[in-house]
Image (tube, rainbow, N blue to C red):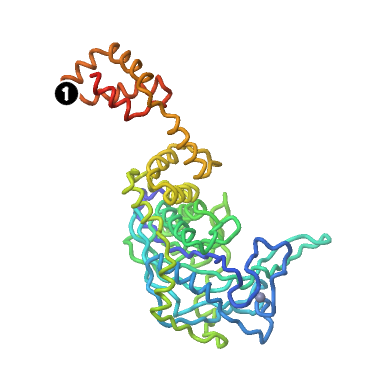
Amino acid sequence: MDNTKNNYQLICGAEIHVELNTKSKMFCGCANDPFGADKPNIYTCPVCLGMPGALPVPNKKAIEDCILIGLALGCKIAKVSKFDRKHYFYPDLPKGYQISQYDEPLCYDGLVETSYGPVRITRVHMEEDTAKMHHAVVGGKKVSLIDFNRSSVPLVEIVTEPDIKSPEQAKEFLKKVRDIIRALGVSSCDMEKGSMRLEANISLSKDGTLPSYKVEVKNINSFRFFANSLEFEYKRQSEILEKGETPIQETRGYRDGRGTVSQRKKEGAADYRYFPDPDIPPLVIDDSWITQIKSRLPKLPDAIAKDLVTAGVIESAAKIIVNNPDYFSFITTIQTLEPSMVKIAANDLVNKKIDANTTPEDYLKTKKEKAGTKIVDESILKPIIEKLVSENQTLVGEYKAGKTGVLGFFVGGVMKVTGGKADASVVNKLLLSLL
Ligand SMILES: [Zn+2]
């Protein structure tokens, strides 16, 4: 991002929506499987179709998963929380309101570290997803179809403070949040399918203080697009500010190749006419419930990276592994099956010596087989070493003069001749006796 021309500081906050993978929906017993459904509108009932008089019953597992996400993001957990109705009119919202949380979210005040500085988490709250619109042509007519399989799927919203200052930081932060949630096992975080969706609130400032406006960019479905929208908005907004004007407070959409495009004037909270949902009593969250949820917290990527470093993996490799879901699951399996192999497997992974189709079990088996065919027979190894020694008398002299590092040359030489199959400890022993 070119911010050398003028000294505007990018100020960005993120909103992240994550669909939970609970068995049933947020407020009814319908299956929560919008991506696996064979047909539209098969997982529906009066509650998620928004029929008058239908009563919502909160999904306990979804609430626990939301709290688990909050805990993993370093949040405090509310002692009392409630659900509110957020009103707006759109065909994908059958009740005319979405059940969400307004002023008493389940989780608040968290923090996620990035290498560019911390990003504070304002809140993590629970709500329900909307139905899905499909725009199609039927009988030559343009129509909009609605699929209610997604209506009322449990949706967690994570809101950050405006602490993101660059596209690079945004990418690192978002990836980290995704990896943490995946490690918790509560969502697939699949951005292509839409089980993880991103929004950016972007403004620019000369002195780092929060300006009076912000531009919201919605419907971002990749980390790259998120970073692109920051770059695009930085350029667009700085041009407006240079003219002495203030960018309009509005909602924009991201279009790949075109940057962000204006959609509508931004609603304020007042436009949504929030009020507590009278059908759902407030939630009381006691310490024993939180303790119980906490016990589900697995080791998170940061902690696993530290473990890898302790196991002898270099820090940069450990970071690559925890940030790659495939590597991550591979290495955690190795850690369970054969902890002594973690360092070797980690190096093989980052050096791309392991085929993508190799399972950790296969990998360990192959390694063991190779180890089993190691040449330990001294009558085979001794002549090889003797030949190397006689051919490299200068190095032998250096060794005798105290340069023990030359041993590596001889070990390497034996490995070259034997195709790496010589047993290193036997080679070392023979070398020392011959030298
Ligand atoms: Zn339902």
In the image, farthest residue toward the left: 401
Q: Measured from the top left, where is residue 83 in percent x and y?
A: 51, 81
Residue found at x 56% / y 71%: 154
Q: Quadrant of residue 36?
A: bottom right
Q: Nearer the viewer, residue 122 or 23?
A: 23
Residue at 43% from the left image edge and 56% from the top image edge: 176
Residue 304 point in image, percent of width and height: 38, 54
Q: Quadrant of residue 163?
A: bottom left
* Element carrying mark 1: loop
Q: Is residue 136 left or right of residue 343?
A: right
In depth, the one of 245 and 251 nearer the eye is: 251
Instruction: Report how many numbered discs are placed on residues in the image.
Output: 1
- Does residue 213 appear anywhere in the picture? no
Give the class, few, some or many, for how many residues have Cα within 10 Å of label 1's Cα (few <14, many ≥20).
Answer: few
Q: Is residue 205 above or below residue 335?
A: below
The vertical placement of 47 against 295, above or below, is: below
**Quadrant assignment, res 420:** top left
Residue occupying the point 43% across, 40% down: 350
